[in-house]
Image (cartoon, rainbow, N blue to C red):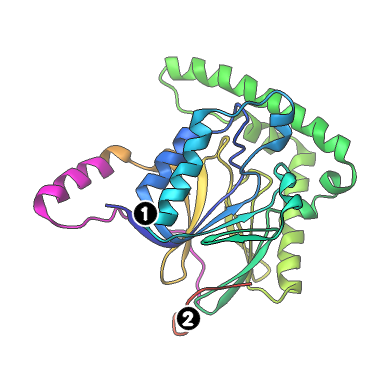
Amino acid sequence: MKTQFKTIVLSDVHLGSKGSKAKEIVRFLKQYSCENLILNGDIIDGWQLKKSGSWKRKHTRFFNRIVKMMENDKTKVFYLRGNHDDFLDQILPLQIGNLSIQRDMIYESNGRKYFITHGDVFDSITTNLRWIAYMGDIGYTFLLWLNRIINHYRMRRGLPYFSLSQYVKGKVKSAVSYIDQYESELAKMARAKGCDGIICGHIHKAENRNIDGIEYMNSGDWVETMSALAEDHEGNWQLIFYNEINFKEIRNSQFGSFFSGDSHFTPLQQVAFDSPKEDLTPPAFR
């Protein structure tokens, strides 16, 4: 039995790179169903594939899972272009059945309107000084390599997963300042577009908070954080972290419901903003 949502947002999967958690995200998608699936940029890492990356069978399984969601659950899929999959510029916009590929979108649900974009358009380094962005990508790749070594050692010692790059970001003052400025500027953009909130990715930092009256939400990534944003049918948004999902409990509940005939939905802790409940209109996309 799957937990059902209206909308799930994923970003920064970086398929084709060594750090991509392709197996984990496929396992995650098998536990949940949704009416709308928004892939918010950097799903395929074209930068890494041009350099030292490689495409593996587990990366293909991700798209096989998406196809099954479209066929079995009639899920509408929106693939938004990120900076690492900027090769999509050559075909934008494209609509094939329930699959739409576009640069960004406005999502309307339960009387609220959200601007959804990957977020790199607001990163002046990525857009104006591309060579510096590539250098930053090299440094991040090195941190991920070092992170794998550290966590292999920690796993043998029975210690929990540790994110080295998140630790570095939290300690480097310039990185903290950049993230704060990034979030503030995105909130301003949402207000300028007449939206109640903004949903983004890009900086690999999952977040769900209010910035000067604007709902700022970042879906995180599937390289380290392994997180997603999900909206229930009442318009409440929550962050779901893969490492906090009790798959053993889910399997046991599914096994029990198989014999009892009772459907079971695993409750998840919600992190949501207050939103009006009286105007329950279906979601609209532009």
Q: Which residues are magenta?
A: 250-275
Relative depth, front residue between 52 and 185: 52
Residue appearing at x 75%, y 53% in the figure: 182
Q: Hey, which quadrant is residue 156 in on the image?
A: top left
Q: Residues within 10 Å of mark 2 (few under 14, many from 20)?
A: few
Label 2, secondary structure: give it: loop
Question: Could you tell me residue 246's position as x and y percent?
Answer: 33, 41
Question: Could you tell me residue 197's position as x and y percent?
Answer: 63, 68
The reply to whether the magenta stretch includes residue 106 is no
Check if mark 1's residue and mark 2's residue have beta carbons within 8 Å. Answer: no
Which label is found at residue 260? none
Residue kind at label 1, given as amino acid type = Leu
Question: Could you tell me residue 192's position as x and y percent?
Answer: 76, 73
**Which residue carries the number 2 mark?**
281
Residue kind at label 2, given as amino acid type = Thr
Relative depth, front residue between 15 and 154: 15
